[in-house]
Amino acid sequence: MSLEEKIKQKAFDLGFDAAGITTADPMDAAHSEYFQQWLNDGCAAEMGYLHRNIDKRFDPGQLLKGATSVICVALNYRPKCGRSFQLRKGTLHIARFAQYEDYHPFIKDRLFQLAEFIKNMGINSSPPAKGACPEGERGLKFKACVDSVPLAERAMAQRAGLGFIGRNRMLINPKLGSQFLLGELITTLRLEADEPFEQIPCGGCGRCIRACPTGALGFDGSFDARKCISYQTIETPAPTSSPPVKGACPEGGRGLGYIFGCDECILACPHELGKPERKNTNFQFHPEWQDLTPDQIQAMTEDEFQTTFANSGFIRLGLDRLKRNSAAAQAARS
């Protein structure tokens, strides 16, 4: 078994569902040019953080000095499609990934374990890649990343052979679909890279576009976050007045009852058919959250909110924004 195969097998042992390796070379200029134009067009809405560290986003070497390789992993979050997704009247929609514990520390912890595994294999950096080990520093270096780090992870994962970026702007893996979360381990260890996944055009299929309630997706592969329900329910600021700020949750989102994220463009994709359910049961799932009613959310205290959603992405959302989203969804259904 080669070194690369041993590393991938360890990633699987840690609970990841896919793993691939690419170089830490800067990405093709087409990616950064597209992204810059997307920002210039205002499609990032109020996500000011996307305007920062653009140079790092497309060059892993600027995130870790001397980096030569990037190990990309994917964690399947597809749950069993039981009662939690057979919505009853009066219930609210929560995107599937959001019904789990916060994936950031979950994935990072396992990337740290993967780094320790590689270190303990007794590999050294001799001869080191040029610039990999600054004077006075020897040994392997690692940086664990999830989407809170400025790295174009879907483009990186495609280059590592994990899938292709579809018209819905999601990374699509032929075996997993697109209901998975990504992580990256940047390292100074020089590894043999996998073949990039060939970009497969979506052809004439426009199911994701027709499924998007707010027209955030275009047939040309464009995406406008200003119209996206996930952006509107997760990223827009908390309300400063009551009733909820106009435009805080778009009409399509209200009508569907989404209060955190959106799954419509994912679930409409033909590549989702027949894909496996998650294997990693250590990733804590909370189907009971899907049973919350608008009245329960509106009556929730801060202490109840912190207890109910401890160690989840809802904590970042905050109670005020959750109540705003719930009120908007309830008003649309009444």
Image: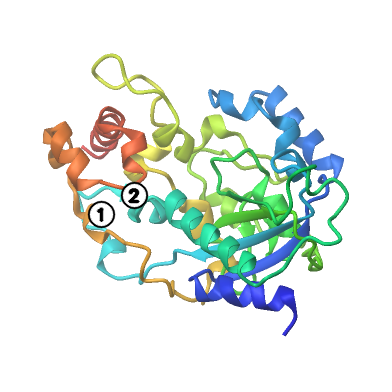
Residue at 38% over, 68% down: 79
Residue at 49% over, 61% down: 110
Q: Quadrant of the N terminus?
A: bottom right
Residue 259 is drawn in which quadrant?
top left
**Residue 99 in picture, x, y percent from top left:** 33, 54
Instruction: Report how far apart the C-alphas of labels 2 and 1 lie in the structure.
Output: 6 Å
Q: Nearer the viewer, residue 199 or 118?
A: 118
Query: Which amino acid type is marked by label 1?
Result: Gln
Q: Nearer the viewer, residue 329 or 21?
A: 21
Q: How many marks?
A: 2
Query: Which amino acid type is marked by label 2?
Result: Ile
Residue 103 position (above or below residue 30)? below
Name the residue carrying label 1: 290
Residue at 34% over, 23% down: 238
Q: Quadrant of the C terminus?
A: top left
Name the residue carrying label 2: 94
Residue 261 in the figure: left or right of residue 118: left
SS at circle 1: helix
- Badges 2 and 1: C-beta atoms under 8 Å apart? yes
Q: Residue furthest bottom?
A: 1
The answer to which of marks 2 and 1 sits earlier in the sequence is: 2
Residue at 56% over, 34% down: 225
